[in-house]
Image (tube, rainbow, N blue to C red):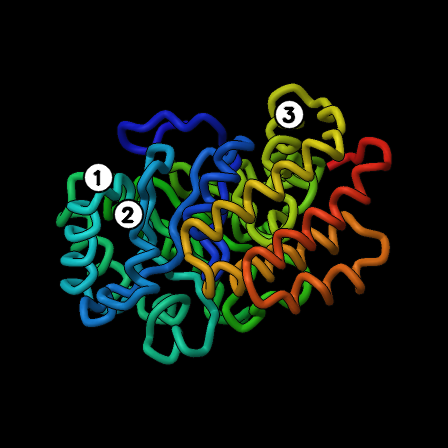
């Protein structure tokens, strides 16, 4: 699959997720075969760019190409200026967020709230596409609510505006993350547009990825929550889609080394205080994925007050876990 000048190494990509897809996690998932990994959502408002959080979200040092920056906003010209600024900082693809269901985002008429104003969507897409000479992609939901599933209309606007690829989460904004994702709308979208379409929502196994692609006719899949504590899912999904085989189990010693390297990269990227805090969520997910009785480990890992203590606890629990056989991950 191509997006603009870029030939993707895989049609299985990582979904942008606030608080999750920082540079260390993006690099990790790309290493396991994610074809793209977009940044956490960055506000188009330049008044917020000087914050420590925004500076870190714009840090792409050492990141595999193409580097994708996701922007959120509601003003066409502000978004256009933000796109230009991020391209100047190294962004090679600009992704626009019209899918976030969070109240604080929709309350500013950003994210999935934009789906209620198709004319504004068209103005935003046109402004951003014309502002930069890199591909612009778009992430949406199927509509604001189930009575107003206008994903097909939005997709047609996107294609006509020059959007290079589209990712569709198979839920409405009103659904948030409840219930099961529906893929009929994604199938309808793909039938109406020729640009690459990524199906997103509840894709948590290699088999599910293959089934969703077969049903929707989409060009690729976007994986979000299933990557939490399991960045190696991209390896497994790629093998299933390309060869229809199951990947060999990772050795527990290899998994241990992956997790410890991830921790180290978080500490280096964020520093002592923030590194400990950010690492907690990832360690919690790893515990849930790998340990039969994670409560004690979680208590020690979440309670650690510095990187040295947290890392030492991680080594202790992972070394004990390594004494078992290979685990299918």
Badge 3 or badge 1: first in the primary sequence: 1
Residue beneath the point at 42% across and 56% down: 270
Q: Is residue 32 above or below residue 179?
A: above
Q: CA distance from mark 3 to mark 1?
A: 30 Å
- Left or right: 136 in relation to 268: left
Residue behind mark 3: 239
Identify the image quadrant of the N terminus. Answer: top left
Nearest the eye: 272 or 147? 272
Nearest the eye: 266 or 20? 266
Badge 1 or badge 2: first in the primary sequence: 2
Residue beneath the point at 16% across and 53% down: 85
Residue 236 seen anywhere in this rendered image of the structure: yes
Q: Secondary structure at mark 2?
A: strand
Q: Secondary structure at mark 3?
A: helix
> What percent of the width, then of the height, locates residue 12?
53, 36
Residue behind mark 2: 94
Q: CA distance from mark 1 to mark 2?
A: 7 Å
Label 1 crowd (10 A; few <14 / some 14-19 / many >=20): some
Residue behind mark 1: 134
> What percent of the width, then of the height, locates residue 54?
30, 62
Q: Quadrant of residue 324?
A: top right
Q: Are marks 1 and 2 in contact (CB under 8 Å)?
A: yes
Badge 2 or badge 3: first in the primary sequence: 2
């Amino acid at each position: 699959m191509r997006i603009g000048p870029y030939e993707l190494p895989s049609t299985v990509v990582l979904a942008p997720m606030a608080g999750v897809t920082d540079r260390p996690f993006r690099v990790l998932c790309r290493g396991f075969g994610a074809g793209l990994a977009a940044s956490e959502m960055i506000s188009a408002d330049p008044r917020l760019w000087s914050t420590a959080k925004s500076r870190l979200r714009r840090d792409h040092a050492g990141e595999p190409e193409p580097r994708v920056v996701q922007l959120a906003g509601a003003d066409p010209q502000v978004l256009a200026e933000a796109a230009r600024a991020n391209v100047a900082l190294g962004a090679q693809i600009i992704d626009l967020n019209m899918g976030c269901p969070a109240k604080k985002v929709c309350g500013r008429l950003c994210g999935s709230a934009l789906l209620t104003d198709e004319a504004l969507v068209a103005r935003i897409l046109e402004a951003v596409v014309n502002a930069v000479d890199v591909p612009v992609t778009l992430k949406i939901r199927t509509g604001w609510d189930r009575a107003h599933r206008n994903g097909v209309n939005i997709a047609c606007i996107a294609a006509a505006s020059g959007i290079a690829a589209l990712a569709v989460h198979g839920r409405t904004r009103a659904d948030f993350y409840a219930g099961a994702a529906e893929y009929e709308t994604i199938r309808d979208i793909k039938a109406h547009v020729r640009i690459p379409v990524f199906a997103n929502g509840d894709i948590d196994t290699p088999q599910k990825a293959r089934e969703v692609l077969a049903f929707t006719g989409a060009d690729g899949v976007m994986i979000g929550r299933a990557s939490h504590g399991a960045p190696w899912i991209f390896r497994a999904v790629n093998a299933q889609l390309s060869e229809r085989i199951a990947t060999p189990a990772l050795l527990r010693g290899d998994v241990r080394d992956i997790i410890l390297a991830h921790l180290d990269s978080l500490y280096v990227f964020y520093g002592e205080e923030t590194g400990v805090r950010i690492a907690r969520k990832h360690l919690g997910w790893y515990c849930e994925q790998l340990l039969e009785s994670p409560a004690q480990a979680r208590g020690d890992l979440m309670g650690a007050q510095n990187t040295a203590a947290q890392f030492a606890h991680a080594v202790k629990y992972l070394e004990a876990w390594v004494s078992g056989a290979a685990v299918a991950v």
